[in-house]
Image (cartoon, rainbow, N blue to C red):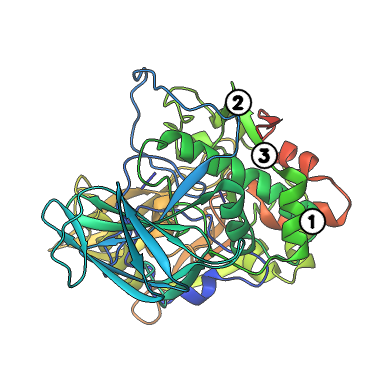
Amino acid sequence: MPTAVVLRRTLVGIGALLAIAACQVRSEREPPAAVAQPAPVALAPMPGPSQPSATPIPAEPAPRILPAIDHEPEIGVLLARGSRVRFTLLAPGRLQTGAQGLDLPAGTVTVEAAAGGWRLAGSGAVITGEGVITVSVAAGQAAFSTTLAPPFGKATTLKLSGRAVLSAQGGTVALIERLPMETYLAGVLPAEMNPAWPTGALAAQAIAARSYACARWMERFDQPWQLHWHYTVDMAYGGWRKPTPNVTAALAATRGRMLMTRGLPILALFHASSGGTTEAAGNLWPALRGPDGRTQIIAVMGVADDPAAVPGAKGLGLGATHQRWKADVPLATITAGLQAWAAEKPGVRPAFGTVTGVRTGRRFADSKRVATVIISHRRGKKTVDTAVPGNEFRLAVGPGVVRSTAWDRCVIAAKDGGTLVLEGHGFGHGVGLSQVSAWWLAQQGVSADQIVGRFYPGAELRSAW
């Protein structure tokens, strides 16, 4: 689940692992990386549902003026940003730029960055402001599509039902979809949770996702976009999809309902499976704040027993992935992952050499999860020990390989040049809602309100629209 952040280029071979049978492992947000264009934009320090930034926030930042949450907001979703973006209108549309309008036929549209703005490819007219394309389709139908290059794995084609928005940003052009919040959530739910799951579980996920999305909207309401389409930056977003009964019912039952503290929506982080005990948000992201930059929200996501995780994982046939798991990771893979991780964090010293050993360092006193991992690595003729935050190690090596920081065993096997053998439980960072637990609880008749109450006990559940 859900909470800001350059993607690990080292997530080799785990694309298929991330789409697990019953629920997405998207709660694994990490810093957006520079990838093949069109690339995700590197965010300013703003936490996301699955991997908030660890960048310190000033203790007393200047107060921010925030919009009121008294109606359903329209949000912008960043789809692509680069020197050139391409998308396809599924019907004729009209491009509006200020007072100027231009009719566009159905088909491919290519836009390129230009000095001081952007322009349609092949056109000499440079547009400095924002361009909005409205497509003539029936309400609730897809209006345009685009093929996106995710940080890892195969290219993904999304159909979108909102308006296509073009905006010049820092010498590049951004392609944004602008649409109502509830319509956006209809594309999030089936990407984050199996749409065939009980309505109660989907409704709990809807409340968490809406809370997260609204907090992001408040943080960036005055920017061209507020949320990124990819789960490594924000929540997983699948674009327009044919409505399914359970998803439709879950959204209708929770419309406008979100988790709040001190009148602000919380960045309601979530994950695949707690393994039996959740993690405290403050252990991983002590600087986590509400959208005003001041209000602490970590208290509503503390350590809690979660007995539903075990029967949930087993009931879904995911015991070997979401409950008890084992990973054999070649030290060469760890070396490559940590070297790429260190390259993305210039302040990390010393730079990693060839990894020769991995052992558990400190554990958090409350959750017992691994807080630091001690890496032994050769630099020249010397062997150096470097401590790496546990969750950062997991993301660097691959969240679909090192499935959690709840380690039960950590040894080095002398085979194939050295292999790290890990055994652990749970899947994800462990903060907030556990998705397999939500499935189990809903199967037992527990309501969505009661489910979110278990995982965000300090938050108030309110209807904003």
Mark 3, residue position:
256
Mark sitting on residue 299: none
Q: Amino acid at mark 1?
A: Thr
Tag in front: 3 or 2: 3
Residue at left offset 38%, top offset 18%: 63
Q: Is residue 300 left or right of residue 287?
A: right
Mark sitting on residue 261: 2
Query: Mark 1 packing: few (<14 Cα in 10 Å), some, or many (20+)?
Result: many
Residue at left offset 39%, top offset 44%: 4
Q: Nearer the viewer, residue 61 or 210?
A: 210
Q: Amino acid at mark 2?
A: Thr
Q: Amino acid at mark 3?
A: Gly
Provide residue 345's location: percent of width, then percent of height.
Answer: 24, 50
Query: Mark 3 packing: few (<14 Cα in 10 Å), some, or many (20+)?
Result: many
- In terms of sequence position, does the residue under pointer 1 or pointer 2 come before the other? 1
Quadrant placement of the C terminus? top right
Q: Is residue 422 left or right of residue 306?
A: left
For the residues bearing labels 1 and 2, Cβ distance under 8 angstroms: no
Q: Is residue 92 visible?
A: yes
Q: Is residue 182 left or right of residue 305?
A: left
For the residues bearing labels 3 and 1, Cβ distance under 8 angstroms: no
Mark sitting on residue 199: 1
